Amino acid sequence: MHHLRVNDQIHLSPYRRSDKAWLIHHISDPEISRNTLAIPYPYTEQDADEWLTLALQEKEKYGTPANWVIRNRRDELIGCIGRQMLYGKDSHTDEVGYWLARPYWGQGIMTEVVGVFCDYWFDNSPLIRFTAAVFSYNGASARVLEKAGFQREGYLRKHYFKNGAYEDGFLYAKLKE
């Protein structure tokens, strides 16, 4: 699978080395780092090179990408969605993570992407459960998950350490129907 259609404007595909410039451009927004656990700020060329190497190695290791690029109709990178492969590709459960470039916020894109992504894995792997965690201050991401069929399962007190502070989060899950 090299292409996953979301709608007429958006599709998912594997990472390419040529995505580096768009990756750096969009992740240089401090709000992307603020709302994700592992993305550093500032985001450097070295960070992009390391991420692209990892994403390409995952594709080789698992035979399919774990992380997918969200692309617009011009085939430009505008975000990312991926599964963590916490327990290997044949596990029944995994965690999903994502980010979307600021110019595309508030348009319902991420809700559709999350839905299509989860359905793809439910249909093409042993997965029956996806979890997702969001910082308690990130209401927009919580709404994305809820609209995509996730249910809140828990409140994670001081579960994350980000930028020198302990942060609370919400745990969400979606089950295969």
Image (tube, rainbow, N blue to C red):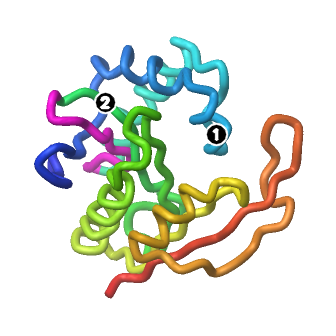
Q: Secondary structure at mark 1?
A: loop
117 w.r.t. 173: above or below: above
How many marks the image carries: the answer is 2
- Expressed as whole percent of the image width and height from the top left, the position of residue 44 reads 57, 14
User: Magenta span has 30?
Assistant: no
- Residue occupying image coordinates x 52% and y 63%: 95
Q: Nearer the viewer, mark 1 or mark 2?
A: 2
Q: Which residue is mark 1?
A: 38
* Quadrant assignment for the C terminus: bottom left
Q: Residue at x 50, y 23 (%)?
A: 50
Task: Determine crowd level at label 1: few under 14, some 14-19, many 20+ residues with C-alpha closer than 10 A.
Answer: few
Q: CA distance from mark 1 to mark 2?
A: 19 Å
Badge 2: residue crowd in 10 Å (few <14, some 14–19, many ≥20): many
Q: Quadrant of residue 125?
A: bottom left
40 with respect to 158 (left or right): left
Q: Which residue reaches farthest front? A: 106
Q: Is residue 73 above or below residue 140?
A: above
What residue is drawn where x is 37% and y is 20%? 22
Out of 83 and 158, give the one closest to the viewer: 158
Amino acid at the residue labelled 1: Ala
Residue located at (60% from left, 78% from top): 152
Q: Magenta span has 64?
A: yes
In what element is the residue under mark 2?
strand
- Rendered location of residue 2, percent (x, y): 15, 44
Task: Give the magenta range.
Answer: 63-74
The amino acid marked with disc number 2 is Leu
Disc 1 and disc 2 in contact, CB within 8 angstroms:
no
Q: Is residue 153 left or right of residue 105?
A: right
In the image, which disc is placed on residue 77? 2
Q: Earlier in the sequence, mark 1 or mark 2?
A: 1
Residue 78, x across and y down, in percent: 34, 33
